[in-house]
Amino acid sequence: MADGLKAGDLVQLNSGGPTMTVDEVEPWDGYIRATCSWFEGNKKMFDYFRVTSLSRAEKPGPAIAIGRMPGKWG
């Protein structure tokens, strides 16, 4: 997957997990790795992954408000 992978791309581990943002792609110890970040609640996490273990992820859609909005429908 190293083809065209760049900072800002959204990815996910091939085995699943959270959608992550690629922060950097670089050669490392004989392979290409990506530094990726994501949030768990309000805590920012990051780790390094071989690009062969990543797949492109769909961009998350906009948040949708559920419930009544004052002044609009009630």
Image (cartoon, rainbow, N blue to C red):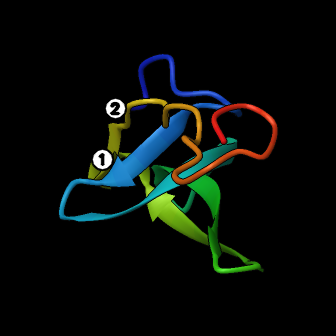
Query: In which quadrant will I find the C terminus?
Result: top right
Image coordinates of residue 3 in percent, x first then y, are 42, 20
**Residue type pointed to by label 2:** Met
**Residue type pointed to by label 1:** Thr
Image coordinates of residue 30 in percent, x first then y, are 46, 54
Which label was assigned to residue 68? none
| Distance in Å between CA atoms under marks 1 and 2 | 6 Å
Q: How many marks?
A: 2
Name the residue: 57% across, 67% down: 48
Residue with the mark numbered 2:
1
Q: Secondary structure at mark 2?
A: loop
Q: Is residue 17 above or below residue 69?
A: below
Q: Which residue occupies the extreme right position in the image?
A: 71
- 3 or 41: nearer the viewer: 41
From the viewer's perspective, tell me whether residue 10 is left or right of residue 24: left
Query: In which quadrant will I find the N terminus?
Result: top left
Q: Earlier in the sequence, mark 1 or mark 2?
A: 2
- 37 or 74: nearer the viewer: 74
Q: Is residue 64 above or below residue 16?
A: above
Image coordinates of residue 35 in percent, x first then y, are 64, 57
From the viewer's perspective, tell me whether residue 27 is left or right of residue 49: right
Name the residue: 50% across, 17% down: 4
Within the image, what quadrant is residue 73 found in?
A: top right
From the viewer's perspective, tell me whether residue 16 is left or right of residue 44: left
Classed neighbour count for the residue bearing mark 2: other residues with Cα under 10 Å, few (<14), some (14–19), many (≥20): few
Whether label 1 touches label 2, CB < 8 Å: yes
Residue with the mark numbered 1:
52
